[in-house]
Image (cartoon, rainbow, N blue to C red):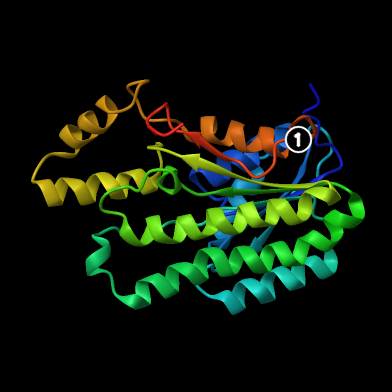
């Protein structure tokens, strides 16, 4: 099975922690040159140092704040002037605050739409021309199982994640002919800072301890535990490989079997 990414360059967003960083680690182990994208430069420097270089890879980072579309645009345009060859794009951005959808202000939807779909669109438009020229491209969006089964208490996130999934499917139909695939990985409950925030939110809302909430959540998962970031990253990395060339336009849950739809 061909998992070799030597000579390929990956742009990985939200990559100083959690699933983003774990994905960057896996791609580097497969031989890719990895460029990390996040807003905290100190964390970016430290994260770059953790990446494998046994295949003489050159790893870089870009400082960009995904809450500011113009900042992202400027940062990526500056990067691509120097390093125009991007074969792999990993779209990964933290989700919005939780709460019932009926209570959400319209500004929350607009802000989240800009952080996720608008940034994704700009990034794709920026790198697809080179992917077409190379005859190889992988776009993987790390979103959520909520696109298959909405999660109670995450109303804004459910809405925008669904929009990203639809956008991605449309891209897959347009770009497949050029050797470019576009897929979504849907993490379930995963050991990340995001999960910590969800546990805290539910603990306060239900008047239970975090441990009680965690136990209840794990009981709803067939494997009876939370996933690890590296397990989600392994799925992302596989979709980036030459071996996954015919996998296009899918929503792949990595959730221990919790999602009830087929």
Q: Is residue 206 left or right of residue 166?
A: left
Classify mark 1: residues with Cα within 10 Å, few (<14), some (14-19) or many (20+).
few
**Front-most of 225 and 49?**
225
Q: At x 77% / y 54%, what residue is drawn? A: 175
Instruction: Determine if residue 181 is in view.
Output: yes
Q: Is residue 34 left or right of residue 188?
A: right
Report which quarter residue 103 is drawn in: bottom left
Where disc 1 sits, the SS reads loop
Above or below: residue 196 compared with residue 261: below
Q: Is residue 129 left or right of residue 11?
A: right
Q: Quick one: quadrant of the N terminus?
A: top right
Instruction: Determine if residue 97 is in view.
Output: no
> What percent of the width, then of the height, locates residue 45?
62, 54
Q: Residue furthest left?
A: 207
> What percent of the width, then of the height, locates residue 68?
53, 75
**Front-most of 164 and 127?**
164
Q: Is residue 244 left or right of residue 204?
A: right
Above or below: residue 113 compared with residue 243: below
> What percent of the width, then of the height, locates residue 112?
44, 67
Q: Which residue is mark 1?
A: 246
Q: At x 67% / y 40%, what residue is drawn? A: 51
Above or below: residue 115 compared with residue 6: below
Above or below: residue 251 compared with residue 230: below
Q: At x 80% / y 50%, what residue is drawn? A: 87
């Amino acid at each position: 099975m061909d998992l070799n990414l030597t000579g390929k360059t990956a742009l990985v967003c939200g990559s100083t922690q959690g699933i983003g960083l774990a994905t960057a680690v896996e791609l580097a182990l497969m031989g890719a040159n990895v460029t990390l994208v996040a807003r905290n430069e100190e964390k970016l420097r430290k994260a770059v140092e953790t990446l494998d270089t046994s295949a003489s890879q050159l790893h870089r980072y870009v400082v960009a704040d995904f809450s500011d579309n113009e900042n992202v645009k400027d940062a990526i345009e500056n990067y691509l002037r120097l390093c125009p060859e991007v074969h792999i794009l990993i779209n990964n951005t933290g989700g919005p605050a939780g709460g019932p959808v009926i209570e959400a202000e319209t500004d929350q939807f607009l802000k989240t739409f800009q952080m996720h779909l608008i940034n994704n669109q700009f990034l794709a438009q920026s790198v697809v021309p080179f992917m077409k020229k190379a005859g190889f491209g992988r776009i993987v969006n790390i979103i959520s199982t909520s696109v298959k089964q909405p999660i109670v208490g995450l109303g804004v996130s459910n809405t925008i994640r669904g929009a990203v999934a639809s956008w991605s499917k449309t891209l897959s139909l347009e770009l497949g002919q050029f050797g470019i695939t576009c897929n979504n990985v849907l993490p379930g409950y995963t050991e990340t800072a995001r999960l910590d925030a969800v546990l805290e939110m539910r603990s306060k809302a239900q008047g239970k301890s975090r441990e009680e909430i965690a136990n209840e959540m794990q009981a709803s998962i067939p494997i009876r535990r939370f996933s690890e970031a590296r397990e989600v990253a392994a799925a992302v990395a596989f979709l980036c490989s030459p071996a996954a060339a015919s996998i296009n336009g899918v929503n792949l849950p990595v959730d221990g079997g919790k999602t009830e739809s087929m």
